[in-house]
Amino acid sequence: MLKKDLYFITGFLGAGKTTFMRNLINQLKDKKLHVIINEFGEVGVDGKLLSDLGVALDEINNGSILCSCRMDQFVSVLSSALKKDSETIIIEASGLTNPANLVRTLNQFKFTDYINYKGCICLVDAKRFHKVVETAVVVKKQLCASDYIIINKSDLVDEEKLNEIRRTIAIVKPDAVITTTSFGQIKMDWFSASMVESKDESIDAIQTVDITLKKYLVKINDNTSVDAFTKFVKMFLHETHRVKGFIKLENKIFYLDCVGTMFKLEEYYSGDIINNFNKIVVLSGKGLDTRKAIMDAINTYNNAELLI
């Protein structure tokens, strides 16, 4: 059996991984692709956003694939993907995944006999980088484990800020291969065959859960207006890293995609049927009083309930 190329995409919440994935898939459209999407929240969102591209797709939700809670499922899904008629596998990890033991996992389960590992590509949000690198432990681990680092959303900052980001990354990973982009644009010649390093498997071999990371699931009541929903979400955004989901408001389906305090709600026009709407995933971490902020918003607007 011919070896299949495998790309592993990582990056903290809101770095632009899904947009990048769309661009990567389009760049590889002459290949038979199999995509594996991992989301930390119970409700999958990113898979729906990629489903129109016509590629084979598997989803692993409610945990990070390299943590013990989802490792068995990851091994099973990847094993199945390797047996199917595809040439390239792309894995989009949860924004909260620590990829430190990825290479060790691939070796442990003998996946390297069947794949040509193209490397771990880490996306960085230029606008929010300095905030998240100091407040989320997993960000530095993602940088350290990556073979290639892409500073995304570079159009939102000036050159001085970009240089600051480069210097910070160089402290975390001195030999980092770094490039910049906007809107997740990609050039395949960035990823040369020589970019994958030989990693010491003994480093970070045990995957542990970052107990500072929190997730919540909020159910929005039927018959909520767009205006009421907007005010509700904005009331707790300042205490979150990421909020997303599909919502039915005023007989229309909307896609909610908030990064930090940036609110984004747009009508969703895809022909795909959304069955699990009106549940939004809220992700937060160290120093954020998210539960209290959500409960304050629920008590104020009385249009939602906290499920978990």
Image (cartoon, rainbow, N blue to C red):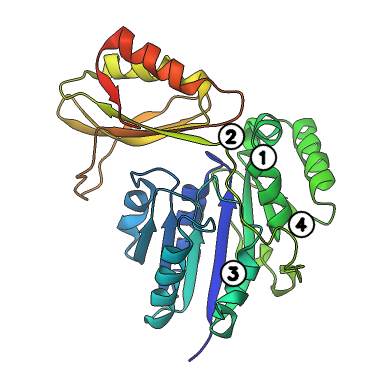
Residue at numbered disc 4: 177
Residue 255: in sight, yes or no?
no
Q: Residues within 10 Å of mark 4 (few under 14, many from 20)?
A: some
Q: Which dot, 4 or 2, sits closer to the camera?
A: 2
Separation of marks 4 and 2 at Cα, in angstroms: 29 Å
Image position of 149 (left or right of 40): right
Residue 21: image location, x then y, percent? 48, 55
Residue 212, numbered label: 2
Residue at numbered disc 3: 105
What's the residue at 52%, 38% (across, down)? 14
Residue 36: image location, x then y, percent? 43, 62
Q: Residues within 10 Å of mark 3 (few under 14, many from 20)?
A: some
What's the residue at 45%, 49% (across, down)? 63
What's the residue at 69%, 74% (across, down)? 193
- Quadrant in which residue 165 is drawn: top right
Image position of 130 (left or right of 297): right
Q: Point out the tag, 4 or 2, that comes first from the N-terminus.
A: 4
Q: Point out the tag, 4 or 1, that comes first from the N-terminus.
A: 1
Question: Which three-letter amino acid code belongs to the residue tagged 2?
Answer: Thr
Q: Residues within 10 Å of mark 1 (few under 14, many from 20)?
A: some
Q: Are marks 1 and 2 in contact (CB under 8 Å)?
A: yes
Residue at numbered disc 1: 137
Separation of marks 1 and 2 at Cα, in angstroms: 8 Å
Residue 126: image location, x then y, percent? 66, 36
Does residue 235 lie above or below 214 as drawn? above
